[in-house]
Amino acid sequence: MFYRENGQFKTTYKEDQQIFPITQDRIGVLLLIAFAFIGVPMLADEYMLRAILIPFLILSLAALGVNILVGYCGQISLGSGAFMAVGAYAAYNFFVRVEGMPLIVALLMGGFFATLVGMFFGIPSLRVKGLYLAVATLAAQFFCDWAFLRIKWFTNDSASGTASVADLQVFGMPINTPYEKYTFCLVFLVVFGLLAKNLVRSAIGREWMAIRDMDVAAAVIGIRPMYAKLSAFAVSSFIVGVAGALWAFVYLGSWEPAAFSVDRSFQLLFMVILGGMGSIMGSFFGAAFIVVLPIIINLVLPSLGAMVGVEVSTAALTHAEQMIFGALIVWFLIVEPHGLAKLWSVGKQKLRLWPFPH
């Protein structure tokens, strides 16, 4: 009874095109954003901010970019880790080589160069799709891993092969404490989340979905496949590149190419599958699931082992985590192919009818 749209009439086109047309949704989103900015820093300790919330925000942003390409446009990509690496190293070189380069501009420039690389490796999507396109984007992953490992210029000729940044500032304000880093990442996520939500509802978003559903029929009705596919690669790579720069600058501080290996690409793809392809909300669900599940496993499995007198080693925890991830992906693909976002949608539909059963 509390989640009803009865009586919420739209009298203008502007009202009809709102991102959240239902009043309860708007109120809920505003309360959630307010709680994220005000309530979470007051309740969370330093460990939770560093180990859980900051990785969740950055990986949510990266999953958002992957979802635009995979979920909305239907182009399978295994090069997301490479695009994150391009964003991180491009932002790093702008930040250390250009005197007085603002941090936000460096992050956005990292996203811009990730866009160029993403569009280049997205060219095969004009001729191939499915597993063949996945292999083509996987080539981008291997090439970037080799380039950032072997070409010392990318790491500012560092002898150790690692890149590091310190004393981050935005408009003269330092970003050193976990609270400051959390707020900085949250601002990026809210801005890009709202932009992505608007984008997928626009004309180009509908073109992406038409290409995903049936590219031949989309071309027949006048949609340009080249423009739609390359624009999806461009937008996705930009968001993923900014997320990679945030991951390197804010979360890691010091990193090497292994931080953006092919495992990261698979992790982001798993987030989209588990959260729900073609859903902005699914990106957040998938990221939360992937970030929180290893922590739960590390807490629960040793306790269960102690109850039965079995010591669970660190290696066993790692293997158990991979096994559980694989089992969950298979289970979701069989039981609920649309992921956690579909369960959220079903729950909202039930609330519209509550307390009536049908």
Image (spheres, helix red, strand yellow):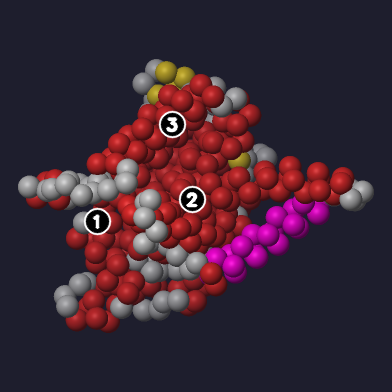
For label 2, the residue is 285
Q: Which mark is residue 36?
A: 3
Nearer to us of marks 3 and 1 is 3
CA gap between label 3 and label 1 equals 25 Å
User: On screen, 302 above or below 104?
Assistant: below
Task: Name the secondary structure under disc 1.
Answer: loop
Label 2 with label 3: CB-CB less than 8 Å: no
Q: Residues within 10 Å of mark 3 (few under 14, many from 20)?
A: some
> Measured from the top left, where is residue 318 in percent x and y?
74, 53
Residue 118: which quarter of the image? bottom left
CA gap between label 2 and label 1 equals 20 Å
For the question of whether residue 357 can be seen, the reply is yes
Q: Is residue 326 magenta?
A: yes
For label 1, the residue is 201
Which amino acid lies under the numbered mark 2 shown in the image of this protein?
Phe
Task: Name the secondary structure under disc 3.
Answer: helix
> Measured from the top left, where is residue 164 in percent x and y?
58, 34
Q: Which residues are magenta?
A: 314-333
CA gap between label 2 and label 3 equals 15 Å
Left or right of 261: which side holds 29?
A: left
Which amino acid lies under the numbered mark 3 shown in the image of this protein?
Ala
Q: Is residue 98 magenta?
A: no
For the question of whether residue 260 can be seen, the reply is no
